[in-house]
């Protein structure tokens, strides 16, 4: 775990190294993914079957092993313990309501020149969701990806979900039932992303692919952008906690580990203005780790990538936060509002001492699919708009064309495009 102090002479350089640190895929991952995608494009289902057997130990030789049917999802939902079913339903309801408020409005108006202008928002026809299997098999991820797509009005929602050694997570199936998923295919990795983009003999291609995954999945999405739309190229999870000494150090230690347990290359950072509090939190992280079932992963993350930054005043925190542009930012102070207004770059911000980031992963409502790796400088979290596109429209009558057409002719001629100019001039009788 790295300790930095903003008062130290070498702080600026050390902090810049932290900002520039990359915890994402290397060139060999890009090469491997390129080969996998080409194989899926050329051989379709045959490539999927071979790669699924090799990487997941799941055989697709039997046609029944390719899909998880809606009846299985309904059965998984029915078999949930009542408290867990209620928790999933609450999460789904809150996610749905929050995302319904994101639906954009169509526009249709006539301006002062008499030109009719506007735009129509429509959903994509089909969306593909990548939902990880194994250690990262989370029903919350399915809800966070599927519900915005359904709210947007997507007609066909296809999930790819690896089932290592054939093991299926019933919670993911129950979440799929709640969200109204149309298809679930038991394939994963870069090959599943390729199948969604190109289509295979069994799997129809989609228009947009969203959802979390490992380095190979993220790289596949990056390479396929343009063939399909994607939500983002997501890297390892990260959290920045800004906290003063009034906080319970056990709470802050747990907050830091809430992201460290995701992945050995996840990153947790604490900014505080109290050296004693920093020491205490570091000690409490060790105590918390001793009690975690996920201690192996969380320890590797914290010991390798964890950071505590001491500052003379928390007034320094917004500038540091903007440079880090973290996925999650917690502001654990009495009055977080001024700092919220000063932090321009963050995936999602959690305000006050009683708002842990973990509540946002499940039941708060906003999406937990967020930009990582400093991409919050230019990207936003997953929303309804990721599953929609806008078509503008224009309508002119004779008076409107005479009002603005000559300017278009002048610009077309200046750009050396006489056919452009001619298409307008003929209508103006010039």
Image (spheres, rainbow, N blue to C red):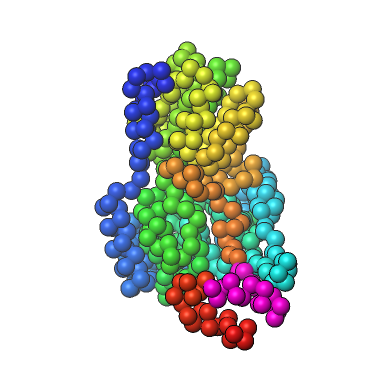
Residue 258, percent from left and from top: 50, 34
- Tell me if I can see residue 95 in this picture: yes
Q: How many marks?
A: 0
- Tell me if I can see residue 76 in this picture: no
Picture quadrant where residue 22 is located: top left
Near-viewer residue (290 or 304): 304
Tell whether position 15 is magenta: no
Picture quadrant where residue 294 is located: top left
- Residue at image point 70% right, 64% down: 107
Near-viewer residue (402 or 124): 402
The C terminus, quarter of image: bottom right
Tell whether position 405 is magenta: yes
Picture quadrant where residue 123 is located: bottom right
Q: Main secondary structure of the magenta part?
A: helix
Residue 145, percent from left and from top: 56, 54
- Residue at image point 37% right, 18% down: 8
Residue 243, percent from left and from top: 54, 23
Residue 327, percent from left and from top: 49, 40
Left or right side of 391 for 202 = left
The N terminus, quarter of image: top left
Q: Is residue 248 above or below residue 166?
A: above
Which residue is at the far top?
A: 276
Q: Is residue 416 above or below residue 277?
A: below
Left or right side of 129 for 109 = right
Left or right side of 74 for 259 = left
Span of residues in magenta: 391-410
- Residue at image point 53% right, 22% down: 314
Q: Is residue 267 above or below residue 397?
A: above
- Residue at image point 51% right, 67% down: 207
């Amino acid at each position: 775990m790295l300790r930095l102090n903003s008062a130290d002479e070498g702080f600026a350089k050390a902090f810049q190294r932290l900002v520039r640190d990359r915890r994402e895929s290397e060139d060999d991952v890009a090469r491997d993914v390129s080969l996998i995608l080409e194989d899926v494009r050329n051989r379709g289902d045959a490539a999927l079957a071979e790669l699924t057997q090799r990487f997941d130990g799941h055989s697709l030789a039997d046609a029944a092993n390719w899909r998880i049917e809606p009846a299985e999802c309904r059965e998984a939902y029915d078999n949930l313990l009542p408290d867990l079913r209620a928790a999933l339903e609450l999460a789904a309801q809150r996610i749905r309501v929050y995302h319904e408020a994101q639906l954009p409005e169509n526009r249709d108006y006539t301006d002062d020149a008499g030109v009719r202008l506007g735009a129509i928002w429509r959903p994509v026809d089909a969306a593909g969701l990548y939902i990880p299997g194994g250690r990262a098999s989370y029903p919350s991820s399915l809800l966070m990806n599927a519900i915005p797509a359904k709210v947007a009005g997507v007609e066909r929602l296809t999930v790819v979900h690896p089932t290592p050694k054939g093991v299926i997570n019933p919670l993911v199936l129950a979440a799929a039932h709640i969200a109204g998923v149309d298809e679930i295919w038991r394939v994963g990795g870069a090959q599943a992303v390729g199948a969604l983009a190109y289509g295979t003999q069994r799997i129809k291609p989609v228009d947009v692919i969203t959802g979390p995954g490992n380095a190979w999945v993220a790289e596949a999405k990056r390479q396929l952008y343009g063939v399909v739309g994607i939500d983002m190229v997501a890297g390892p999870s990260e959290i920045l906690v800004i906290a003063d000494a009034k906080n319970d150090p056990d709470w802050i230690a747990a907050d830091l580990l809430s992201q460290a347990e995701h992945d050995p290359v996840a990153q947790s950072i604490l900014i505080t203005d109290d050296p004693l509090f920093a020491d205490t939190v570091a000690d409490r992280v060790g105590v918390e780790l001793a009690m975690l079932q996920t201690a192996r992963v969380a320890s590797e993350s914290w010991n390798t990538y964890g950071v505590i930054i001491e500052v003379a005043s928390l007034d320094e925190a917004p500038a540091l936060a903007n440079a880090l542009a973290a996925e999650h930012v917690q502001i654990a102070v009495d009055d977080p509002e001024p700092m919220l207004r000063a932090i321009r770059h963050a995936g999602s911000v959690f305000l006050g001492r009683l708002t842990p980031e973990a509540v946002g992963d499940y039941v708060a409502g906003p999406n937990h699919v967020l930009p990582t790796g400093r991409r919050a400088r230019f990207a936003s979290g997953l929303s309804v708009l990721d599953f929609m596109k806008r078509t503008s429209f224009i309508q002119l009558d004779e008076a409107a064309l005479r009002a603005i057409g000559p300017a278009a002719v002048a610009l077309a001629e200046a750009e050396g495009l006489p056919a452009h100019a001619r298409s307008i001039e003929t209508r103006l009788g010039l």
